[in-house]
Amino acid sequence: MRMKIALALTSVVFMMTWVTGFVSVISRSMSVTTAEVITSDLFFIAIIELLSLISLFGSLLFLLEARKTLSRWYLTIPLCVSIFLFIITNFLVYSDEKSFLGAPVSTVETLWLVILALLSPSSVFFFLSSNGHDGSMYVYVAVSFAVSIFSIFFLFLALREISKWSSIDGVLLPLIFYWDICMPAIGVCFLSKATMHRTNNDEQES
């Protein structure tokens, strides 16, 4: 049961744009004042920070439980570290007074983008930790690996734009696609793994 909860909590950071979008829609229907606050950069970053903390707790819980049942539990460590670093850089961005990802992009924001892109490759190792314990593992690995290829491609484009001392307006579409489609796809894999975990793993864990 703890593994299922851990997987569900870990998925949260990958669903951050869907969650923030849902909060924004709800707030707009409540009051104009709240809507103005919810669309601000600081509130957006604060929501991401909260979701990242939830995911960090979930990934650490999974790591503790995985050590008891999975021979490749150590493959979950990269995701735990990535989420932890993401929380730190997100806090630094939150503390910055400049417009989020506005020109010129700061060093902290550049690091934020790098770690954001590394969340996908880290999830590949996370799913590989269940090798032999999850019949759907290959699907999860394939999805996260495909997203990882796109994330590295996006990161290359973003860093090239940043190196020109310009904004990332030229790569906003890839960034939006990564945030809104690719990362949630990994989040769905985590949720699917959480729901399928008992069916596929009870015998191995008993």
Image (tube, rainbow, N blue to C red):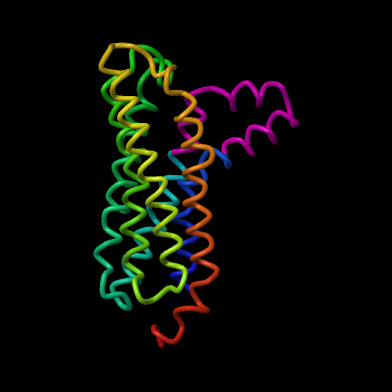
Image-based side of 56 in relation to 30, left or right: left
Residue pictured at 34% horizontal, 34% vertical = 153
Task: Depth check: give the residue in front, 105 or 182.
Answer: 182
Q: Main secondary structure of the magenta part?
A: helix
> Residue 28 in magenta?
yes
> For residue 129, what is the image quadrant?
bottom left
Task: Depth check: give the residue in front, 182 or 73.
Answer: 182
Q: Position of residue 1 (x, y in %)?
A: 49, 74
Q: Is residue 51 above or below residue 60?
A: above
Residue pictured at 26% horizontal, 75% vertical = 71
State which quarter of the image contains the C terminus: bottom left
Q: Is residue 159 above or below residue 198?
A: above
Q: Is residue 86 above or below residue 68?
A: above
Magenta residue span: 20-48
Q: Is residue 162 above or below residue 122?
A: above
> Residue 198 in magenta?
no
> For residue 171, what is the image quadrant?
top left
Residue pictured at 46% horizontal, 62% vertical = 139
Q: Position of residue 20 (x, y in %)?
A: 57, 37
Q: Position of residue 37 (x, y in %)?
A: 59, 24
